[in-house]
């Protein structure tokens, strides 16, 4: 019975937890008259994918237009586009996005699942784009035999493509479209 004090403490903690839960449940369900709200507004769901831009031009990124005293519904999880179609990059040196699901890929100090297909030696076999030679360079631009430790964790730069909606309008134009556009003034 060396564990008798431990069992007593565990029992007391459990009893205290049950009492706190019961008290919170009883007193939390009581409503004061000044907190009463119409049932129609309390049950009206607020769309989670709604984008709310307040009058001062700021984006409401945290509450998405849901008033502080209301409960919003979380947005649905974005689905990974598993199309294996590469997206066009928007600017030079942009890390390409990942056009397939990577759920369950082990990337830690002992193993990098991405390199099974994307290592330069295996890329042709798996019909995957090989990792850029820049990933084999150290900080002094010296080439290494294996992937550089600073480029080892792929998802710190590369992200999967999803069907998530665009939350902020983007008017970015790459240099090619700017150069192809006629100059202002029609000359």
Image (tube, rainbow, N blue to C red):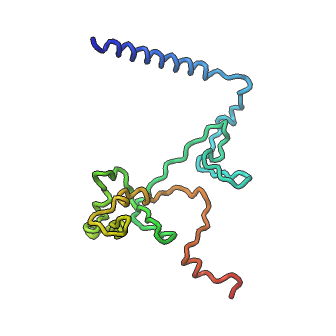
Seen at 55% across and 43% down, the residue is: 74
Observer-nearest residue: 135 or 127? 135
**From what the image shows, is residue 158 above or below residue 176?**
above
Check the image and report above or below for 168 versus 4: below
The number of discs equals 0
Left or right, 130 with reference to 183: left
The quarter of the image holding the C terminus is bottom right
- x and y percentages locating residue 14 in the rendered image: 43, 18
Residue 55, percent from left and from top: 74, 52
Asked which quadrant contains residue 177, the reply is: bottom right
In the figure, 83 relative to 92: above or below?
above
Q: Front-most of 62 and 36?
A: 62
Residue 136 rendering spot, x and y as whole percentages: 33, 66
The answer to whether residue 13 is left or right of residue 149 is right
Picture quadrant where residue 96 is located:
bottom left
**Position in image of residue 23 (x %, y %):** 56, 17
């Amino acid at each position: 019975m060396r564990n008798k004090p431990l069992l007593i403490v565990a029992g007391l903690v459990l009893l205290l937890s049950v009492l706190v839960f019961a008290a919170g449940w009883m007193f939390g369900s009581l409503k004061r008259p000044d907190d009463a709200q119409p049932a129609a507004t309390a049950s009206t769901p607020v769309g989670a994918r709604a984008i709310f831009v307040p009058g001062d031009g700021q984006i409401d990124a945290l509450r998405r237009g849901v008033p502080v005293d209301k409960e919003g519904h979380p947005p649905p999880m974005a689905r990974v586009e598993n199309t294996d179609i590469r997206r066009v990059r928007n600017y030079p040196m942009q890390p390409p996005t990942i056009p397939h699901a990577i759920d369950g890929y082990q990337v830690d100090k002992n193993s990098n699942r991405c390199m099974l297909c994307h290592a330069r030696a295996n890329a042709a076999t798996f019909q995957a784009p090989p990792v850029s030679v820049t990933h084999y360079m150290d900080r002094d631009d010296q080439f290494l035999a294996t992937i550089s430790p600073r480029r080892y964790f792929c998802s710190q730069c590369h992200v999967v493509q999803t069907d998530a909606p665009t939350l902020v309008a983007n008017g970015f134009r790459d240099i090619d479209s700017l150069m192809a556009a006629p100059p202002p003034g029609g000359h």
